[in-house]
Structure formats: structure tokens, C-alpha cells
Image (cartoon, grey):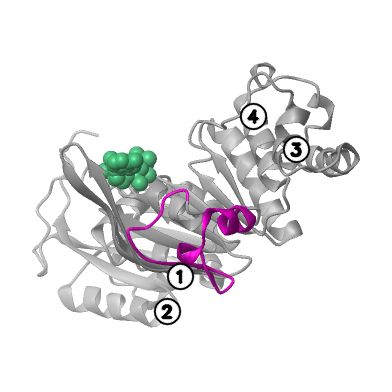
Amino acid sequence: MIKLSHIKKIYETSSGPLQALKDVSLTIDRGEIYGIIGLSGAGKSTLVRCINMLERPTEGTVEIDGQDLTKMNEKQLRAVRKKIGMIFQQFNLLSSSTVYENVAFPLKLAGTDKKTIREKVMPLLKLVGLEQKAQQYPAQLSGGQKQRVGIARALASGPSILLCDEATSALDPQTTQAILNLIKKINRELQITVVIITHEMKVIKDICTKVAVIDHGVIAEKGPVIDVFINPQQAITREFISVLLSDELPSAFRQQPVSKEPIEGGHLLLRLTFIGESADEPVIMQLIKNAPDIDASILFGDLDQIQAIPYGRMIIGLKGSAEKVEMARKWLEKQELKVEVIGYVRRNDTALV
Ligand SMILES: Nc1ncnc2c1ncn2[C@@H]1O[C@H](COP(=O)(O)OP(=O)(O)OP(=O)(O)O)[C@@H](O)[C@H]1O
């Protein structure tokens, strides 16, 4: 278990002290894939570098399996760091060494004999799918292959934690997916706890079990990924999610005044979120059956998965008498879904499409 308590980090800069982390506390359980998301400069890298003490926190404690790293000397830290592998956005490979030598590097540094190195490196190259590339140099590899070397190297000393600092940010979407799948496989098969730093909500959605949103050096929000997606509490979290789940209104409703009260000839717009089994249920069909006197139209719909749990979002417009529309809304609220009221909007069919 990783336990960060009341971490503060102040950098001394030429323009004065800069507080990069302000009282950050976070607990990451063994076996988890924990995502930390934030905008550029939010403090993500500083936070992850505090976990392996590449940055010493100005205040607070970093405990790994009950041991407080902030109280350790360099020698003790070197021993603990063997339990913590790290991969980087720019891969940080040795350009004049082969793939094999790059992976062997931490073992060589630790004084491991050649035979043991070989016995460890070859299975790792197999694990990351690079056994045919052992004698190639980094310049001969694609970005995805370079990151695979980085992963194999990070695993060489048999860590129980893998820190990933924007590990897929330099990769195209397809390669990103392949690397995320590899990280997931490593987490599952080797029971390695993974901490992922990213600015992309898609990375969080695809592989993380829990997420912390960091903003200006503080944790704005944290929790299981599915909960944070469905009930984001902070504006910054909603912003990250909206990049992924566009639910823009059709042009006829855009830039129209939204009222909290019913308006003559207006539609009540509702945002519906379906989770798990309810994502497969024909709720709109049932709504039409239960409220035949109103006009219900689907304005936006999207079905996705978070941690293999189906997750659907829809924006619907309800039109009819105020009383019937209210009844339909109440009926929806009794179903197994989340209902958010956007408001009453009048349709403008002269709007440009
Ligand atoms: N070594 C350093 N010396 C001084 N200031 C630093 C240092 N490292 C980071 N900072 C500052 O601390 C703040 C947090 O930086 P950090 O790199 O942790 O953010 P980040 O969320 O990882 O950003 P990015 O995604 O752009 O890498 C920033 O204002 C940054 O300029």
C-alpha cells in the first residue's frame, strides 16, 4: 500500500518559492491501477516523483507497505526504489545500448551476474513482445516499441509498484491502447500496483480502477473511476469528462435561452445516465408507453464501457403540457438511471445546422 499524508512541496525558484503541492493525501491499495489526472502544471509529476522520493516532499510522509520513505537515508532509499519501477513519456532509453542492454541496465548496476541477467531479461522481452528485437538499438524502434523497452527495464528489478509518468502521451491512439493493454496485463499477471499520471481522461477510463483529480497542487476529487464519471463533483472533473463524452445539443437547441421554469412551446431537456444492466433497457420505449401524451425525442446518445461496466448517456427532449412533462420526468426518476435536468428550451428550427 502507498500512503501519502499531507504532502507539501515547495520549489525554490529565482522568482521566489513555488508551492507545487499543497497538503496532498492519497492512499493507493495494493493491486490497484490508480490514475492521477490534471492539467499541465497541476503538480502530477511532482506528486509521482514524491512516491519514489526523486523529489523529497517539503512536508508530509510517504509510506510504502508501512515504511516511511521520508525518514530514510540514500542507502535505504536505493533498496526501497528497487520495489518501484518507473516509465516516462520520452522513454529515457540509452541510445548507444541495445534493447537487451537497456533492460539489463538496472540489473548490471546492482551487480547481478550475467547468467542471472539473461534469465531475467529474456522473459521480460517476451512479456513485452520484443524478444526478436533484443539486439536492435532504440533508434531502430517505433515509439510503442521504445515504451515496451522502458516497461521491461522498469520490471527488471522485480518491483511491486510501477509508476507511469505520461507514458502514452507521445504515442498515437492505437499504440496508446496497446501499451495500456500491456500495463493492464502486467498489473493482473504480476500483481503490480500501477500509478498512472495523465492529462487524458480516456487513459483513466480505459484502465484505472480509481482516480484522483489534481488541480493547482491540491486533490480536487478522488474515488472509484465509475463514481467519478457518473457523479463528478468539481467543474474541472466535468471538463475532463466532457472531452470524452461530448453531449452537445443539436443546433436547433444551441445558444437558446435555458429556463428553469416551463416555457410555452419549450422542451424539457434531460440528461440521462445509464449504468450497468440498465444501459441495455429500453427505457425510452417504456417512457413513450407510460406517457403517451408527450412528445419525447432523443437529441444525443452514446454507449460506452468503464471497467467493463456498460455506461450510456442520452439527452432527451420532452414536450407537452407542463403537468404531463412533470409526470414523465418523475417516472424517469423512478427508473434505474440518473436524471439531470438541463432546463426548458425552445426549439429554433431556423438555426444553422
Ligand atoms: N524542479 C523544479 N523547480 C521549480 N519548479 C518546478 C520544478 N518542477 C516543477 N516545478 C513547478 O511546479 C509546478 C508543478 O509542476 P509539475 O511538473 O509537477 O506539473 P505537471 O502536472 O506534471 O505538469 P505537466 O503535465 O506539464 O508535466 C509547476 O508550476 C512547475 O513549473
Question: x%, y% of residue 284?
Answer: 42, 66
Q: Is residue 285 visible?
A: no
Q: Give the Cα distance between marks 1 and 3.
A: 61 Å
Question: Considering only order in the chain, which callout, 3 or 4, is on the residue closer to the N terminus?
Answer: 3
| Along the viewing direction, whichever of 21 and 71 lies nearer the viewer | 71
Neighbourhood count class around disc 3 (C-alpha, 10 Å): few under 14, some 14–19, many 20 upward = some
Mark 4–mark 2 Cα distance, whole angstroms, equals 49 Å
What kind of residue is marked 2? Gln
Q: How many C-alpha atoms fall within 10 Å of the one at disc 1: few (<14), some, or many (≥20)? A: some
Closer to the N terminus: mark 4 or mark 2?
Answer: 4
Looking at the image, do the residues carrying marks 1 and 4 touch, with CB atoms under 8 Å apart? no
Q: Which residues are magenta?
A: 54-81
> Residue under circle 3?
108
Determine the residue positioned at 51% across, 71% down: 278
Tell me the distance, in whole angstroms, between the alpha carbons under discs 1 and 2.
8 Å
Name the residue tied to disc 4.
146
Crowding at label 2, few (<14), some or many (≥20) Cα neighbours within 10 Å?
A: few
Mark 2, ligand 1, within 8 Å: the answer is no
Q: Earlier in the sequence, mark 1 or mark 2?
A: 1
Badge nearest the viewer, 2 or 3: 3
Give the residue drawn at x 17%, y 72%: 321
Q: Helix or strand or loop: what does disc 2 sit on?
A: loop
Q: Of the residues shown, which amino acid type is indicated by label 1?
A: Val
* Horizontal arrangement in the rendering, residue 156 relative to residue 66 (left or right): right
Is residue 66 one of those drawn in magenta?
yes
Q: Which mark is residue 335?
A: 2
Residue type at tag 3: Lys
Residue 186 is one of the magenta-drawn residues = no
